[in-house]
Amino acid sequence: MSRWAVVLAGGVGSRFWPLSTPERPKQLLPLVDGSPLLRNTLDRLAPLVPAQRTLVLTNAGLVGPIAELAPELPWENIIAEPRPAGTAAALAFAASEIARRDGESAVMICVHADWSVGVPEEFRRRLSQAADLAEKHHALVTVGIVPTRPDPGFGYIQPGEPADGDARRVARFVEKPTREVAERMVENGFLWNSGIFVWRAGDLLEEIRAHTPEVAPALAAGRDIGDFFAAAKSISVDVGVLERSDRVLVLPGDFAWDDVGTWAALRRVRQRDAHENATSGDVHVVDARGNVVHTEGSTVVLYGVSDLVVIARDGLTVVTTVDRAADLKSLVEKLPGEVRDRR
């Protein structure tokens, strides 16, 4: 079986303002350890898929920085999307490119560039199992994360009838629920919708032609990437393909996965001190607990405070609470341009 990796690396990650910028978005930031998230992702995949069969989809402005970050990738494997068009279009283009280079039976392992994975060996083992399932059953396989908490920030998957081993058919997908609904779903065995997808290139293309009129016309537009994305309407692969297909299997995964969606998430994925403070940079913490601090080029001292998020860079300091860290996008929209757009 020929295996390919597809890494989705677009977007800015506005919830990580003021550190993230269009030129240095979330996936290029060292948020979990000393390496950028994208570098971590490629290193995590390397034992499973070689660089020659790894595609990174991003925007045009990031091709150069990604090539510098990952010199092992062939230049033609860093694909610049002409415009954002949703994950269905991005993965459809990747599938058509893989099918052209290696045939429709090649298996695609699709991940995002900005995750944290605490147990990479188990991550790779589950992806390999998912690839075997995709080849054996011609299925669209997703890896659903075994929840560690009832988080309303995630979508959920309800496993259905047994399929093969511990893989199940998908009964339904649920968009981000309320906390109360999330609590009930976790109790009833629902899984987090991680965005990890594994399938044969030809099977995805077949399902798009059958079920996704938003993207199917792009497949007839030819190899030119500009024509392809011009013909595609924006829709996620979850909504446009998986929710409409009867070929979807879910495999449970438990490998300390986190989508690193907000500054508060760093308290889960970074190393912490004895008082649960997660810090990076020149930080001094005294009689403080449960804080997240990231500083570049300055010194931050915390004394007698708890559950704060502090980000300091280039003369700009942002202070909020762990609970409000997810609202930074709303904050940025209310700031004057000279503050909001500082580089």
Image (cartoon, rainbow, N blue to C red):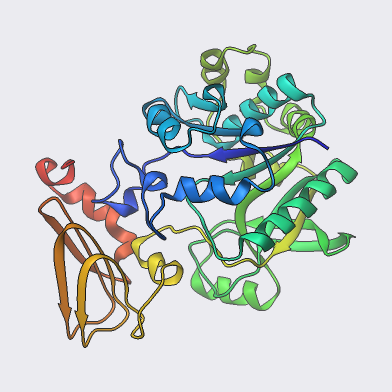
In which quadrant of the rendered image does the C terminus lie? top left
What is the count of numbered marks?
A: 0
Q: Is residue 278 above or below residue 315?
A: below
Residue nearer the viewer, 160 or 47: 47
Q: Picture coordinates of residue 135 (x, y %)?
A: 85, 42
Question: Looking at the image, can residue 247 be seen?
Answer: no
Asked whether residue 96 is in view, the answer is yes
Q: Considering only vertical position in the picture, is 293 above or below 4?
A: below
Q: Who's the residue at 85% across and 40% down the image?
A: 138
| Residue 203 in which image quadrant | top right
Q: Position of residue 293 (x, y in %)?
A: 26, 67
Which residue appears farthest toward the front when viewing the image? 72
Q: Residue at x 74, y 26 (%)?
A: 209
The N terminus lies in which quarter of the figure?
top right
Q: Nearer the viewer, residue 97 or 71?
A: 71
* Residue at the image point whose x is 79% and y is 35% from the top: 2
Q: Position of residue 26 (x, y in %)?
A: 38, 47
Which residue corresponds to the image point at 54% horizontal and 75% vertical from the top-left?
149
Q: Position of residue 104 (x, y in %)?
A: 80, 27
Using the image, determine if residue 295 lies above or below residue 201: below
| Quarter of the view holding residue 50 | top right
- Toward which corner of the image does residue 198 lie, by quadrant? top right
